[in-house]
Image (cartoon, helix red, strand yellow):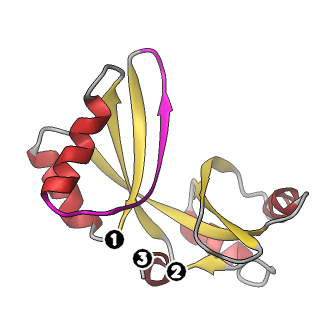
């Protein structure tokens, strides 16, 4: 149930982000969602793309260093305290969140948040009996 995420470093200068997007456009890869965190010299761009293997290959051919990581997409109730309730469940299972980012997904009364855990398979096992909906890759990209 993990979703494959592409992560790559981009220089913190004008044109770096557009260079990545240009490669993806040229190869007809659609970005489902992304996150960009930056420092003074570089940024870490995280992308969810259905055809991640082909996108990885295209980006590497263009000179980018790309890493594939497993993340989980969890639905979070869209009301005050919804995220706090989910995080309490994660805390109960001693699951540490390395990073997370949200995106719109057309889920009526729920948001979707992408979570990175140290061991996604362990997180899946721990959360299996909890009232948390995990979004499958097929559903995310349909």
x and y percent of residue 46 in the render? 42, 48
Residue 50 is marked as 1
Residue 141 is marked as 3
C-alpha separation, residue under disc 1 versus residue under disc 2: 12 Å
Q: Are marks 1 and 2 in contact (CB under 8 Å)?
A: no
Instruction: Identify the residue shown where x is 21% and y is 37%.
Output: 19
Compare marks 3 and 1 and give the one earlier in the sequence: 1
Residue receiving disc 2: 136
Query: What is the magenta range?
Result: 27-40
Does dot 1 land on a helix, a strand or a loop? loop
Q: Viewed as shown, does residue 50 lie left or right of 111?
A: left
Say whether residue 142 is magenta: no
**Could you tell me which quadrant the C terminus lies in?**
bottom left
Q: Are marks 3 and 1 in contact (CB under 8 Å)?
A: yes
Compare marks 2 and 3 and give the one earlier in the sequence: 2
x and y percent of residue 134 in the render? 63, 77
Between disc 2 and disc 3, the foreground one is 3
Instruction: Identify the residue shown where x is 33% and y is 41%.
Output: 8
Q: Viewed as shown, does residue 142 lie left or right of 98?
A: left
Instruction: Answer yes or no: is residue 65 visible.
Output: no
Instruction: Identify the residue shown where x is 31% and y is 35%.
Output: 17
């Amino acid at each position: 149930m993990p979703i494959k995420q592409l992560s790559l470093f981009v220089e913190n200068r004008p044109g770096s982000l557009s260079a990545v997007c240009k490669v993806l456009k040229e190869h007809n890869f659609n970005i489902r969602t992304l996150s960009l965190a930056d420092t003074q010299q570089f940024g870490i761009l995280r992308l969810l793309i259905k055809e991640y293997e082909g996108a990885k290959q295209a980006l590497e051919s263009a000179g980018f260093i790309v890493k594939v990581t497993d993340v989980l997409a969890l639905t979070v109730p869209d009301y005050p305290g919804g995220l706090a309730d989910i995080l309490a469940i994660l805390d109960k299972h001693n699951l540490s969140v390395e990073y997370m980012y949200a995106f719109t997904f057309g889920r009526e009364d729920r948001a979707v948040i992408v979570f990175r855990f140290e061991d996604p398979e362990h997180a899946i096992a721990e959360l299996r009996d909890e009232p948390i909906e995990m979004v499958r890759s097929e559903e995310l990209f349909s």
